[in-house]
Image (spheres, rainbow, N blue to C red):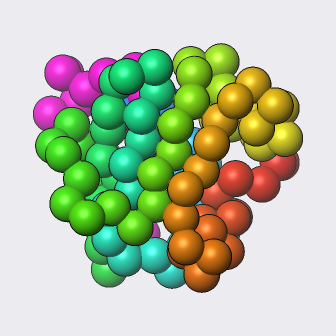
Amino acid sequence: MEVRITDPDRMSLPGLLAAGLLERRLTETRIRVRGDVLLDIAGAQVTLRFGDDVIEVTREPAVEPIAELYGTYEGLIDLAGGHALRALRTGLRVRARPGVMLALLPLLRSR
C-alpha cells in the first residue's frame, strides 16, 4: 500500500505528520479501511482517503467521513511518535463506528 500526498509543497503540518505516521505503520501492518477519515488538528483539516492500494493525504474536504480525529498538535506529535496513550491524554479524540475503530487501531497503537 502506498501513501500519496496531494500537493506536498502546500500540505499542512498535520497532513505531513499523518503521512509519516501512515508510512511507518504500513510497513508493520495492513490496514483494511475504505473511505475518508477527517483529521482536524487545532482547526487545520486534512482528509485521509483510504483506497484499495493507496492512502491519499489531501486538504480536500472529507466526503461522508467514516471516522474523525480531533486534537492538538501535541497530541498528533505524540501519536506520530508512537505514544498513542499519551496522545489520548492530551485530548486527541476519535469518533468512529466500532468496526472502523477496530480497523484503525493498528495506526493508533504504540511502538
Residue 3 in view (yes/no): no
* Residue 109: image location, x then y, percent: 78, 54
Q: What range is drawn magenta here? A: 1-14
* Residue 105: image location, x then y, percent: 69, 64
Direction from residue 77 to residue 49 in the image, left or right:
left
- Residue drawn where x is 55% and y is 73% of the image: 97
Up the image or down, 70 lies above or below 1; here it is: above
* Residue 31: image location, x then y, percent: 54, 73
Direction from residue 82 to residue 51 in the image, left or right:
left
- Residue drawn where x is 34% and y is 24% of the image: 44
In the image shown, does 16 or 89 lie closer to the viewer? Answer: 89
Direction from residue 104 to residue 59 in the image, left or right:
left
In the image shown, does 56 or 44 lie closer to the viewer? Answer: 44
Q: Quadrant of residue 21?
A: top right
In the image shown, does 66 or 2 lie closer to the viewer? Answer: 66
Does the magenta run of residues contain 82? no
- Residue drawn where x is 30% and y is 47% of the image: 47
Up the image or down, 99 lies above or below 39; here it is: below
Residue 47 in view (yes/no): yes
